Image (cartoon, rainbow, N blue to C red):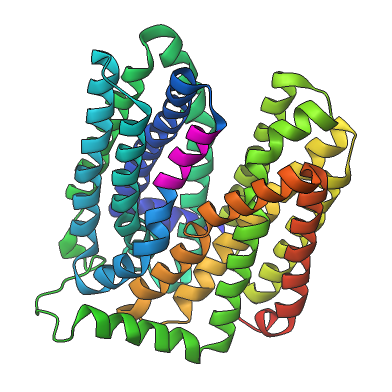
Amino acid sequence: MDRTACHALLANRNVRLYLGGQLISLSGTWMQSVAQGWLVYQLTGSAFWLALTAIALTAPVSLLSLVGGALADRYDRRRLLITTQLLSLIPALLLGFLTRSGHVTPGLIVALALLLGVINAFDLPARQVFWGRLVPAELLLGALSLNAVVFNATRVVGPVLAGAIIAAWGTASCFYLNAASFLIGSASLLAMEPQSGSLPHHSARPSTSLLAELQEGLRFVAAEKESSLLLLLIAVISLFGIPFVPLLPLFADGILHVGPQGLGMLAASSGIGALAAALLLTLQREPRCKGRLVVASGLLFGICLLLFARSNQYYTSLLALLFSGVGIVSLLALANCLLQHRCPMPLRGRVMGLYTLTLAGMAPFGHALMGLLAGTVGAAAALSLGSTICLAAVLLTARPISRLA
């Protein structure tokens, strides 16, 4: 996307409102994530409860994202997102109240994480496909790249704010501020101009059942060989590659011997690479053959992750994580854009439901699998195996995916 296209995107009032709402809402989400983990650890000191909370947040996406995608095709996506934003207030407010009053327990935290996970299962597919209504097809990659810039910026800002707020006002304040961020996110959606033609209008009642619509979406993807392979590649990387993040403490302490400060730098290095990739995609012209870039990004991610797994040098590890962040964000943004370009608008919600399932829905299984492998053969061997599987998946799907444009 060139400078003119970037200007065209940011000149769109709806795009500015949506990005602004995302910036605030996602910052609140990252704040709550950090505060919730800190609270669970304070209450239990247990890795089991930390893992259980993470699984409760992500498991509903595995079960319900296909239904969420079908609903995004059936109903007005802006109203659906407003509803999910307002519903997300409930677990944040309850968590804040329970923490402030001293009645919070690990079980209640897991239950509220599960509730938020159910809401996310309907929010994420609608959010993925919403851009297709906000901008024309030729600007879709640029819009998704801008969205990735916002996401990765909040990934840095949110945790920093959380640490400062917890130190100054306590953990509950993060939950209350997250609830306020959902209100602002809802307000940004309400302030959009539906009469502009960029937002969906569903005036007629759906004539088919939800199950029939789900089957229609699955049949479409099954008939699209390249789209199926793209989703399969994302699923493999979600299972064996992306779950490297929870293993970072094991590398920092047991292999690199750099302590908590080094751990922070390792995590930040991957985040900086991700943010850099999102910025580069935003500033570049629309690629002519995005399939080849998907393959190149997958190879970059797999090779750098394997290099990190085998490294015992701190600065080499930092560099490997930096470029792995570049690879994974480029791959996901380009794959998202390709999938949306290859399906008709009435089916995009269901296709993005499958995308959400293969990406976020695989998270609990990937974390459990890589955690089990790390406990059995060690973190370095587990990640070496995982990155090798990712590289094999990229190479096996390279020829058909590289033809996509």
> Residue at point 81% right, 53% down?
384
The image shows residue 361 at horizontal and vertical percentages of: 47, 59
- Taking 114 as reference, is 227 above or below it? below
Outermost residue, bottom side: 223
Outermost residue, front side: 376
Viewer-proximal residue, 54 or 202?
54
- Whether residue 56 is visible: yes
Image quadrant where residue 322 sits: top right
Image quadrant where residue 24 sits: top left
> Residue at point 18% right, 82% down?
209
- Taking 208 as reference, is 63 above or below it? above
- Whether residue 284 is visible: no
- Quarter of the image for the N terminus: give it: bottom right
Viewer-proximal residue, 333 or 9?
333
Region rendered in magenta: 48-56
> Residue at point 28% right, 28% down?
95
